[in-house]
Amino acid sequence: MAEKYNTTVHEKLSALASNFWWSWQPDITNIFRQIDPLLWSQQRHNPFKMLREYDADKLEKRISDLALHSSINRAYRAWQEYMNEEDTWGNIQGGVLQHRPVAYFSAEFGIHESFPIYSGGLGILAGDHLKSASDLGAPLIGVGLYYDEGYFIQNINKDGWQEESYPTLDKSVLPIREALGVDGKPVMINVPTRNETIHAKVWEVDVGRIKLYLLDTNVQENAEEVRDLTARLYGGDQRIRIRQEILLGIGGARALTAMGIDPRVIHMNEGHSAFAPLEFIRLRMQADGLSFDDAMREVARSGVFTTHTPVPAGHDRFDSGLVEEHVGPLADQLGLNHEGLMALGRVDPQNHSETFCMTVLAFKLSRKANAVSNLHGVVSRSMWSNLWPWRGEDEIPIGHITNGVHVPTWLAAQMRALYDRILPLDWHKHTGEPEVWSSFMEVDPAELWETHQSLKNRLIIYARSCAMQQAERRGAPKEQVAKLADILDPKFLTIGFARRFAPYKRADLVLRDFENFAKLVNSSTKPVQFIFAGKAHPRDDNGKVILQKIFKLTQEDRFRGRVLFLDNYDINLGRHLVQGVDVWLNNPRRPLEASGTSGQKVVLNGGLNCSILDGWWAEAFDGANGFAIGPGRVHSNVEIQDQRDAENLMSTLVDEVIPMYYARDKDDLPQEWIYRMKRAIRSLGWRFNADRMVMDYVTQTYIPAGGGTSSELF
Ligand SMILES: *Cc1c(COP(=O)(O)O)cnc(C)c1O
């Protein structure tokens, strides 16, 4: 990518805006923000859209007024250098993968708030995976679906009930383009079912050095009903779901073939994409004249499967009729009869009453399978042990690679500046190495506290403005809106809780002992304030009831301004919260949180986790790098477990968290607390980040799966 001699600043900015790399470069984000702060926030931080409103002259003038020329030139050069770098970790370590990439399939990708094709943790993880793969130079491409209406926008009405709206994304202002096939024409693939053919076009998105391909059924070749197939994420019934999944898996594989990409490794991020290997089996049979069994053995050698769900009901299952209608045509080409096809998705192939499970299919077509935390590995091995009845439980071939977060995406700029001063030069290129983080223990406590305090102030200002906008939207009287301008006190202990309102996450656990909760919030000496956020799934009325309960509380006089609910949790709100809270509360019903990642984002920014010993926290907590709620027990009776956890939560807050936060020295510094902040960053930063995670995937799964020895699963 040679730099054109006379590239204008307008062209440079457009080029930067067309690759999501900008989104993890604070300096470039800053340039865009400065150009038009108001448009920037109105347009959900979409620089591509913002620049559309500027012609070359107007932009040139604005840039001159702000004296931005040299920062833009520097940013553009940095980008060119990044894109052309050769001695990356991936180039050196990638070995066998170099010429044929890993194809990473995922039903959602959470890259940036301006591109809402994600619903929650799974998508954010996939986005972070791509970004770290890019930074490391790992040879990988992403495959997913393009959702016209994305995930919903959440509004809470006057009664505290969640309402959903689905604005259509405007393709013309997104940095996406038509993917081209080997024939130089826009790619168009199809997947026939028994009743019709699903057509899709393919969009190409740049995420740093990584290409992401998204399939879109909104094309004129499709009947009306099929055009809407990719309209919404997880929006439909089982029939829509299996159709989205044949599109993602079979269609995704066909799109790669059309572009001349023959992946060395197929990584299925969750079971949604497990049909993909079936298409690669078909290709092998066709190209090399192999039998189904031989081709399956070959293809399964290159499969990597990551399971994310410790809840049995959370695994996709389809009945025989749906499978026949949608996968039947491919099965014909594979020479499989209906029972042969169903057997691939059954734990017991002979059991005709078993439905077709995508997770089982994924296991059978993989070489390496992993859970997403140590504890989730234990749960998964026990849950799926009947797939390997001849093995003991600790020989079940499901390992674990604990999730991590992409550091540059989630680290606040001020905190980054502190890291730049304290950690070794180029620390951000070596975030997976423990030595790089050890010097953090030497940071000056006052400086760390100051930095945190300024991030907390920023969160509070942001939360006030959100609260005011929301009250206005709900039609609150002017005086009431005005009163929200000074809610939340920067000196009070601030606890954040933001996550999907899935009932197992128990957003209302802290309210169970209501009397003590009210006392904490209204304490005259050691007050605590809470900020809640999160979406309930549109069809999850139980989740909506919990949300409503919290919302109603925020409207009571005694909690007003001290307990807050912020609408429309997304990457942007998430970033503000994880960067500014003192404490991040996480109280899922163990062992149902496979990993969780939001608490890892908090660690990087100096917040402390207060969490049930579940998911990543069960392996992260060392006694002094945050707080544990209870000893990590489970009970067969959910009610008893909830009650016990609620009691432990209250005592952790009252006996440990609150006193430690308010124990100040003569300079008003909470020394013991600051020690925990340092210890959290030092002991957790290197382990729970996405560079370490992607390096683990490369060395433990991609290289073995790319290397061609036989499957270790079956
Ligand atoms: C990080 C993140 C998540 C995932 O967090 P969990 O800890 O798994 O609940 C979900 N949504 C958003 C917007 C996030 O930023």
Image (tube, rainbow, N blue to C red):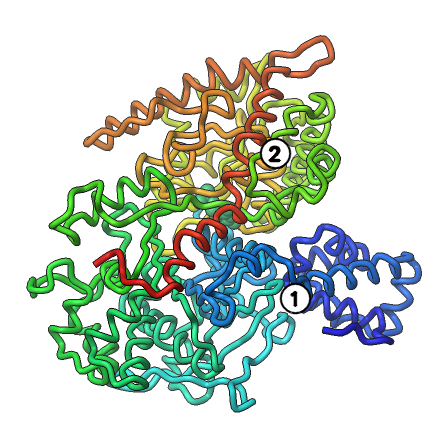
The quarter of the picture where residue 681 lies is: top right
Residue type at mark 2: give it.
Trp
> From the viewer's perspective, is residue 306 above or below residue 411?
below
Residue type at mark 1: give it.
Asn
Q: Quadrant of the N terminus?
A: bottom right
**Residue situated furthest top in the rendering:** 666
The answer to whether the residue labelled 2 contacts the one labelled 1, judged by CB atoms less than 8 Å apart, is no
Secondary element type, mark 2: helix
Observer-nearest of 632 and 705: 705
Residue lying at 51% horizontally and 46% vertically, measured from the top left: 692
Observer-nearest of 293 and 541: 293
How far is the residue under mark 2 from the one under mark 1?
30 Å
Residue lying at 38% horizontally and 63% vertically, measured from the top left: 707
Residue lying at 36% horizontally and 45% vertically, measured from the top left: 400
Secondary element type, mark 1: loop
The quarter of the picture where residue 13 lies is: bottom right
Residue 163 in view in this figure = no
Q: Is residue 155 left or right of residue 69?
A: left
How many residues crowd mark 2 within 10 Å: few (<14), some (14–19), many (20+)?
many
- Residue 67 placement (x, y as % from top left): 91, 57
Residue lying at 59% horizontally and 43% vertically, measured from the top left: 431
Q: Is residue 474 left or right of residue 1?
A: left
Residue 660 in view in this figure = yes
- The tag on residue 19 is 1
